[in-house]
Amino acid sequence: MTASIVIVGAGFSGAVVARELAEAGIASSVIDARSHVAGNAHTERRDNGVMVHVYGPHIFHTADTRVWEYINRFGEMMPYNHRVKATSGGKVYSLPVNLHTINQFFGTTLSPAEAEKFIAERADSSIGTPESFEDQALKFVGKDLYEAFFKGYTQKQWGVSPTELPAAILARLPVRFSYEDSYFNHPYQAIPRDGYTPIVEAILDHPLIEVSLGRSVTPAELSDAEHIFWSGPIDQYFSGAFGDLGYRTLDFVETETMGDVQGCPVMNYCDVDVPYTRITEHKHFAPWESHEGSTIYTEYSRLASDGDIPYYPIRQVREKELLEKYVSAAQEATGVTFLGRLGTYRYLDMDVTIKEALEVADEFLSCRREMRPMTPFVAQPL
């Protein structure tokens, strides 16, 4: 059977909407082009026993109680405190930049207040309103820290000079004047004991949800649907009518070895002459497990082309202009709701993805009860 409600995408966005509708008594069909659910959060256990985040590391962190309680319904979340290290100029530092990083980098023994004053004196006070990524960094941390930790890494990650990237990418510069080295500040931080894929499978496990994997669909094929929830690329829904939106993609070189390779889950490589952006060691994402072997990913970033998995929406000037056209088209469309990272052309953390999917489902059910049209849910203001 094919339900009259069709959800394109079996990641967190599509799965959460399908589950919420199912629990309200509404059947849906969930369709995904991949052979597995969970989208880019998909996890697999390798032969050496290590749980691998197949499309790169995913750390669940949130301050939203509803989202935290929701994901805990479907799997056991294990406490996990994410810490990142960075190699720059042949030395290893902690990220985000904190008091230890500052003292180590400058060879000082500054107190929090002294460090704050020290960095302020090195910041470029001549910059008023930052327009570029580089402006933003120079205004708040100055040339030395910018060039050591941000410039090269950002150039590799985005494929352009930081002078060509908007300041918003670095809107909240992560600098701490304490020795706290946790990467995230949210009260709820965890990774599923058994990986993300079983959680999404559990969300989709309901008699009113039909799941079809390994199947690509076009909007034309879904013309008979009462309503479509589209978490695929928004430009793909409109057949690229205004042009293709740009994405960065990632290439991973996977290596299995023995022992502990780098002693941490993520090591960023900030120097521009190192071709990769970071190395991730996946057994460290499950510190409650013990493995003699190890699986590492060496990560390279490049511009996505046809057939590549899109990871990061570029959202530079050209993409913003195109996105405005697609948003206008989406707002005029009927019988479709756009959601998720691809459907709204935004880089979303998992907790925001779940939160927005819950809100979309709430709105859809409310519209049904009140017999009013569904308000389009599309990309947020640029």
Image (cartoon, helix red, strand yellow):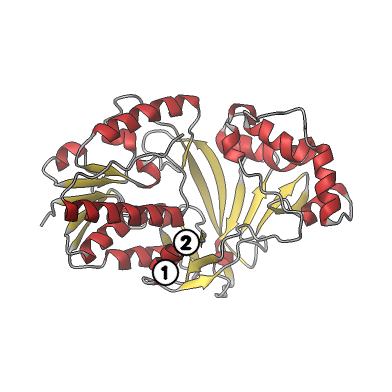
Query: How far is mark 1 from mark 2, CA to CA?
Result: 9 Å
Residue at (54%, 69%) from the top-left corner?
Answer: 286
Query: For residue 64, which numbered disc appears in the image?
Result: 2
Asked if disc 1 and disc 2 are in contact, CB closer than 8 Å, the reply is: no
Q: Quadrant of residue 136?
A: top right
Amino acid of disc 1: Glu
Which residue sits at x=56%, y=35%? 158
Does residue 311 appear to the left or right of 167 in the view shown? left
Q: Secondary structure at mark 1?
A: helix
> What numbered label is drawn on residue 17?
none
Residue marked by disc 1: 69
- Label 2, secondary structure: give it: loop
Name the residue nearer the viewer: 363 or 354. Answer: 363
Q: Residues within 10 Å of mark 2 (few under 14, many from 20)?
A: some
Q: Is residue 20 above or below residue 248?
A: below
Q: Quadrant of residue 3?
A: bottom left
Closer to us: 17 or 276: 17
Q: Is residue 256 above or below residue 154?
A: below
Q: Is residue 224 above or below residue 40?
A: above
In the rendering, at what x and y percent does residue 34 appear?
31, 51
Q: Locate residue 19, reporting x and y percent.
A: 27, 62
Residue with the most extreme front position:
370
**What residue sits 16% from the left and 42% below the top?**
222
Q: Position of residue 166 (x, y in %)?
A: 57, 31
Q: Residues within 10 Å of mark 1 (few under 14, many from 20)?
A: few
Q: Amino acid at mark 2?
A: Asp
The answer to whether 350 appears left or right of 267 in the picture is left
